[in-house]
Image (tube, coloured by chain):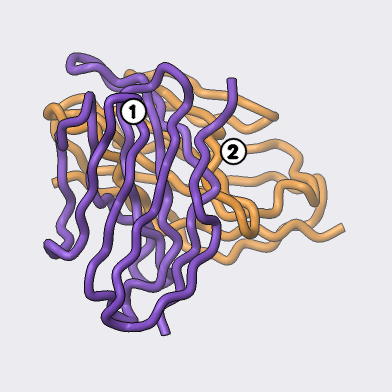
Amino acid sequence: KAGVTQTPRYLIKTRGQQVTLSCSPISGHRSVSWYQQTPGQGLQFLFEYFSETQRNKGNFPGRFSGRQFSNSRSEMNVSTLELGDSALYLCASSDIDVTSTDTQYFGPGTRLTVL
Amino acid sequence: GNSVTQMEGPVTLSEEAFLTINCTYTATGYPSLFWYVQYPGEGLQLLLKATKADDKGSNKGFEATYRKETTSFHLEKGSVQVSDSAVYFCALSGGAGSYQLTFGKGTKLSVIP
């Protein structure tokens, strides 16, 4: 099976702009999670989608949003970018259903730089 | 809430040395435990996992045992190689119905020839 893919791999934006990142999960996986990785804060959970519904959300401001489509692909959006949003954004997919915990498989990430 | 504490690096070892990276956790319920590895410029790769107490996860010579009594999941390898140089993350998920991963800060390992 193909792995988790993320596009684009690199992005450069300026403060105040908005950005959309895309994630295609492993075929058959219905859960997609997003994480932010920074040198200072490490890996932090943003949100998780399962069957087009947001099931969990981390402690991030409302500028961070996401959605999942019927084919399980997911997008996350960051509006009004700030310098501190510069990070590696990682997407992970899993075959988690509502009753069990399963392994999350990560994509290569999107490196966002905000100038 | 859930939390993971792992030894901070960097850790520098000579090739063929023994590796231990300590990881302890705090969680409600019965979490699953993971070790992920990140090579420069890449995303996270699952190294091994354990889903219940006393389970041992193993892969590529790495091992970790789920110790509920000490809330630990230490990573070990008997003989490291230069190619093992990477950042290692301990993580947990599950427990109290939460599927999100909670990560430790990561431990950077450098193996020198």
Camera-near label (1 vs 2) is: 1
Q: Which chain is orange?
A: B
Element under disc 2: strand
User: Circle 2 sits on which residue?
Assistant: B76
Q: Which chain carries label 2?
A: B
Q: The purple chain is which one?
A: A
Left or right side of A39 for A41: left
Q: In this view, does B68 lie above or below B39?
A: above
> Where is residue A114 shown, x and y percent of the image?
40, 78
Question: At x 37% / y 26%, what residue is drawn?
Answer: A94
Question: Rounded to the nearest whole Å, what is the CA distance between mark 1 and mark 2?
Answer: 36 Å
Which amino acid type is marked by label 1? Ser
The x and y percentages for residue B107 are 52, 57
Residue drawn at (34%, 64%), measured in percent from left and top?
A19
Classify mark 2: residues with Cα within 10 Å, few (<14), some (14-19) or many (20+). some
Q: Nearer the viewer, residue A84 or A99?
A: A84
Residue A89 x/y as whole percent: 41, 56
- Labels 1 and 2 share a subunit: no
Q: In the shown orientation, is residue B9 left or right of residue B6?
A: right
Q: Mark 1 points at which residue?
A: A72
Label 1 sits on a secondary structure element that is loop
